[in-house]
Every structure is written in C-alpha cells, then in structure tokens.
Image (spheres, coloured by chain):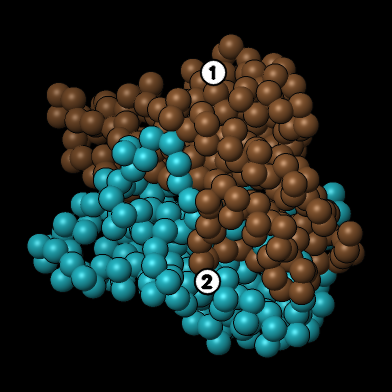
Amino acid sequence: MYIDQNTCIGCGVCLRFCPVGAISLVNRKAFIDEKLCMECGTCGRNNIVKCPTEAIHENSDVYEVPRSISKYFSDPMAYHPETKVPGRGTEEVKTNDVTGRFKRGYVGIGIEVGRPSVSTNFEDVEIITKALCELDYINFEKDNPLFHLMKDPNKGIFHDHVRPRRALSAIIEFAIPIEKMDEVIRVVMSVSNEIDTVFSLEVITRLENGNVPDDVKQSLANIGLEYRPNAKVNLGLGKPLKEE
Amino acid sequence: MTHSLHRNGTCENLKDDYVILVTPAVGINNVNSQDNLRDILDKIFELKPTNIGSYETGTIFSGATIEQIKDQLSETPRVRCCFSDKEKIKELVRYIKEKDFGISVTLSGLTEDVLNIAEELNINPHSINLSLGIYGKTEKLPSEEVLEFTTMCGHGMISKHLVAKLIDDVRQGKTTIDKASETIARPCVCGIFNTERAKQLLKKYV
C-alpha cells in the first residue's frame, strides 16, 4: 500500500487503523513503511478508514511475488489462486463433515503464527516447520497456501525469497494420529521461545456423541494443556456426510 | 486455520456471542450453491443479525447491503455472520436443518451452549475445533482488555491501536459506546465482529 503524498492532507485518520502500525506522519503527511506493511488492504478501503481525500492506494505489483506473499497471507478479501479459498488456511473443520479431512482416530493441528495482533515473518514460521519435520510422520496440508511457499516440505524449508516476507499470520496445518498429539505439541512448545512472535494453537477432532473423545482429552492432560470454553463446532449438516 | 476461533474473554462476556459460518466445500458441493445461500441470507436478515459481511463486499458497518452481499456471492460462496441472541441463532440453525440444504454449517460460541443448541434441535455434531491458547513471545501481545476486541476478527484486521484509542475516547467522553463499537467493527470484512459484545465490554470504561 502507499499514500499519495500530493493528495494526503496529513489528518492522520488512517494511522490508528493499521493493524501493525506501519503508517506514521512524516513531514505532516501520512507515510506507509513498506517494510512493515502487510498488504492487508485495510487502510485503502475507503469505507473503513474514510480518508477524506482517498489518498491511499494499492501498489500495482501487489499480486506479484514477493509482495503477493504478504497479500495472500494478510488480506482475507484476496482469494488464493491455487486453493480458490480466501484467507490463510483451508476449509479445515468448516467442511469436515463432507471432506473427512480429519477422520476418527486423527486430530488436526493448527499453529497460527503471528496471531493475535503481532504478525510474523516466515523465518519464524520456518523455525517451527523445521522442528516439526524432525518427526518423520508430519505431512503438511497441501491445500494450505503455506505448503506452496516451501522449497522442501519434507524438511519444512521455505524458498529464500519467502523467508523475510511478513504477514499478519500464517497457519501451519496437518493431521496426525491422536496418539502422536502430545509428542507433536511438545516439539512445538520446545521452539516457542526461539521465535520473535506468538502463535495460537488449536486442535480439531471428531466428536463422539457430542463429546470430545477421551483419548484427546488424555493427551492434552498429559502435556498440561486445557482448551478454552469457547469453540467452533461443525454441526454435521453437510451432504454427503463423511462418517468415517 | 479459522477466523472464528480463539476469541479471548471470560465465560461471562463470551456468553451470547455466536458466529455462524455456512460453507459449501470446494469441489464437493459449491457448484450452484449460491441460490441456497441466498435463501439462508434472507432468513438471516429476517432474524436481524448483530453483524454480517462477505469477503466481496465488507460488512453492514462499512456500508454493505443485503442485496450487495447476495448479488456478489462468488463461485465458492460463503455466509459469515454473528448473533447475540441464543433463540435467534437456534431459529436459524433449525431453518437450515429443516430446509436440508446439505451445506456445512459451523457454529462458534461457548461450547456448552453450542452443544445444547445442537441437542435441542436433535442434531448430532460432527467435529470440533478447540483453542489451546497463545504461546511464544507473549510479551508482544496487547493487554487482555484490547485482545478481547481484536480477537473478534480472526484475520487480525482490527488494530490494537484503534481499540486502545477508542477505549480512551469512550473513557474521556469523546465518543459514545455505540460509535466506538461500530468503528472498531469496520475493518473486520467478513462480519464476525460482535458489536453487541463490544458495547458490553466498553461499558466498563464509561
């Protein structure tokens, strides 16, 4: 994103809307620091910021690599060309009743790096993906756009041009057997102090008669984790229903 | 993985905060699903949601209308909205179930309340997405009071600076709770920021 210095009147209304504080006033004009900008597009949506002179614009190369990397991982209004899914992840639990992505006996693990309210670069994401690949059974979700940025998905390594890019968040996503859950989460936690950002951790599981399976509860108890009282439930109204 | 999970808060202030997502699966049942989604959207508007939007139009708080949301459904259409009333969300789920659209529906909220709704409607829920918390360099996080607002947009579009400024403005009487809540809601383009919950959270600053 950039601000037309000829039309900006320096009112500063846009500054507070930037999720990462990339906009500042320089010589009484609003200015976007390209190194900090996530290309989320918020400041340029005039019905949101209400810039009085409509001075904020999208760069013409925003859908070209490398700027597009930030765009697709920060702007939910940008549909990812490979997956046709907007946003940063897959349909995950949203359509699990018809895709069967997470089957009985398995859990989905999501590690959303940069969320909430901090953002990330891909070097920090790579610290976690590389650590996970020390476990030889991790297969990153191929429908997640993050997979397409990897030079070697078996080692969790990203292409060189990807690593320094920043995004509001990126989701490391994969499915594993329930019995591997505590080992995997221990690995993730072991590198949590090596990154310069935060991550939100989540698990997806089938419900058994409306209950979280006992082996999932036990695995979480083994590593001292509790889940929040609020969750997202797939009601099973999709067809054809995947029962396995 | 999901934008309607990971909402920070207490059981007390998360009560009556429901997000519903209606999502045709790409490659399975998304083709020609737009009419079914328009039917669901009509029902949602009849019930008067707290917030609604779409990736194509933005939300009712940034000027989108029901007609725009209905007209601009993509080839992989989605419905995203939130309610602040258990009976309304229950009525919506009952409608979708009875019409038997065959499209996936997720409901986010306090787990106990969501599962109670499912039981009352004789629905056997399929899967659950559980939040296990935030880790890493947590000293970079804004305050818990700010996170309660920013995490209502799972895409991270709501600025911690915007929330802090508006809390301050409310505290100083420079703006009203209603205006502050609706201003914070604007950047959340898919419409799952719950303005009613935000108003309740802002009350403590008056």
Reading the image, the residue beneath label 2 is: B110
Left or right relative to A106: residue A224: left
> From the viewer's perspective, is residue A149 above or below residue B45?
above
Q: Residue at x 55, y 87 (%)?
A: B87
Residue type of the residue flagged with mark 2: Leu
Look at the image and tell me in which quarter the C terminus of chain B lies.
bottom left
The residue shown at (19%, 35%) is A10
What residue sits right under mark 1 in the picture? A163
Measured as percent of width and height from the top left, residue A9 is found at: 20, 36
Q: Is residue A118 above or below residue B25?
A: above
> Which of the two residues, A43 or B50, is positioned nearer the viewer here?
B50
Q: Is residue B11 left or right of residue A188?
A: left
Q: CA distance from mark 1 to mark 2?
A: 37 Å
Horizontal and vertical percent position of residue A56? 36, 35
* Label 2 crowd (10 A; few <14 / some 14-19 / many >=20): many
Q: Nearer the viewer, residue B108 or A56?
A: B108
Q: How many C-alpha atoms fall within 10 Å of the one at disc 1: few (<14), some, or many (≥20)?
A: some
